[in-house]
Amino acid sequence: MKRDSRLSLVLHLLLHLAHSKRPMTSEEMGAFLQTNSVVVRRTLSGLRQAGWLHSLKGHGGGWTLACDLSAITLGDIYKALGEPTMLALGHRNDEPACLVEQVVNQAINESLREAEAMVLEKFSRVTLADLSTEVNRRAPRCRQEEVDHG
C-alpha cells in the first residue's frame, strides 16, 4: 500500500512559510520539495479555503501564512486533509467465514483503533508553533536562510 505523505508535505510547507520573510511561490516550494508546483498549489489551495493561508498573484506574490501557528494542531491539519488512512495494515479477508480469521481480524481492528486514537490524541497536542520552535532551536541564526529555502 502506498504511503500518504500529504501531512508531512503540508507541515513542511507551512513551516517554511512561517520562517520566510516574504511570500513564497509554488515554484520555489516545489523546487525544495522536489515536486511539481501544481502539487504544491493543489495542496495549499485547501489550506487557503480553511483560512490558514493567503495567496497573492503577480510580481512579488506567492503564499503567506494567515493564521497563528499556536492555533493550529497537527490534528487540525490531518482533518483538513480528509483524515487519510493512518496505518497500512489490513485483513486478508474483510468478512471471513473462518472463526480463526474472525478472531484475528477483531484483534487487528482493536489494536489499530487504539493506535490511531493514541496518534490522534498526540496530534491534538502538537501545534505548528511547537514545530516552529523546534526548527528555531535547531537552526543557528547564521543558517536561517537555509531553513527559509530548503
Image (cartoon, rainbow, N blue to C red):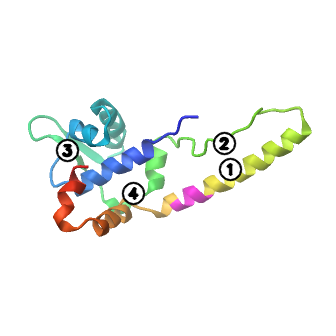
Q: Gap in Å between the C-alphas at discs 2 and 1? A: 8 Å
Q: In terms of secondary structure, where does tag 3 sit?
A: loop
Q: Mark 2 points at which residue?
A: 89
Q: For residue 1, what is the image quadrant? A: top right
Q: Which amino acid does label 4 sit on?
A: Ile
Q: Mark 3 points at which residue?
A: 24
- Residue sitting farthest toward the left: 59
Q: Name the residue under label 4.
A: 72
Residue 100 location (% of width, % of height): 89, 41
Report the number of numbered marks.
4
Which portion, as a residue range, is magenta?
Answer: 118-122
Work out whether residue 131 or residue 143 is closer to the camera in this orientation and state it. 143
Asked if the stretch drawn in magenta spans residue 121, the answer is: yes
- Residue drawn at 54 percent across, 35 percent down: 2
Q: In terms of secondary structure, where does tag 1 sit?
A: helix
First-in-chain label (1 vs 4):
4
Q: What residue type is labelled 2?
A: Leu
- Residue drawn at 53 percent across, 61 percent down: 122
Q: Do the residues labelled 2 and 1 touch (CB within 8 Å)?
A: yes
